[in-house]
Amino acid sequence: MAIKVEVLQATRPSPFLDGFSDSNLAALAAMLEEVEFPKDGRLFEQGAKGDSLYLIVSGQVGVVRSVDRDREDGPAETLNQMLAAVGPGELVGEMALIEGEPRSATVVALEKVVAARLTTDCYEEMQKRNTELALQLSLGLFRVISHRIRQVDRSLEVANYRILTT
């Protein structure tokens, strides 16, 4: 079922939706599918084929990355690290939508979650039929990715400072 435009308007302060005109927001809403996940439900799994992004409408999800670590005294163990908690107005899965690569992390609902899903097929169709909307959406994705790169840069700066001052 398509998501209601009023639901998107409630998340409009999001960097992703910043700058969307009312008509483009309505066109986007028609292409997004409203999906719900119960607490502990998985939006997607690390390593799975990436075929959509999710705009979190309500609730919160955790982004978890699993890494296998070799042990000298036995078999490898899997470590799960929570990378981020993501809430209303934020995106998950955008890298898979852009690149088509396997998921880089698992995303799990930390509470009941309502999200708006945009599939790769819808995104490709949008690029063919509504270039203005596709451009607006792409600019929103760039803003989100740029923000995340800045966060990583700040984290690396702090980590480097700690290494150099100890």
Image: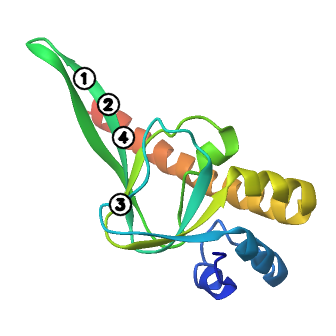
Q: Secondary structure at mark 2?
A: strand
User: Residue beneath label 3, please?
Assistant: 41
Amino acid carrying mark 2 in the image:
Val
Please report contact status of discs 2 and 4: CB closer than 8 Å, yes or no: yes
Please name the residue shown 53% across and 65% down the image.
90
Please name the residue shown 37% across and 34% down the image.
160
Q: Secondary structure at mark 1?
A: strand
Q: Nearer the viewer, mark 1 or mark 3?
A: 3
Q: Nearer the viewer, residue 152 or 140?
A: 140
> Quadrant location of the N terminus?
bottom right
Amino acid carrying mark 1 in the image:
Arg
Please name the residue shown 64% across and 88% down the image.
6
Please name the residue shown 24% across and 31% down the image.
78
Q: Nearer the viewer, mark 2 or mark 3?
A: 3
Write down the quadrant of residue 29 in the picture.
Answer: bottom right
Q: Does residue 164 appear left or right of residue 94 in this picture?
A: left
Q: What's the CA distance linking mark 2 and mark 3?
A: 21 Å
Amino acid carrying mark 4 in the image:
Arg
Q: What's the CA distance linking mark 4 and mark 1?
A: 13 Å
Instruction: Looking at the image, tell me whether mark 2 or mark 3 is earlier in sequence order.
Output: 3
Q: Nearer the viewer, residue 141 or 53?
A: 53
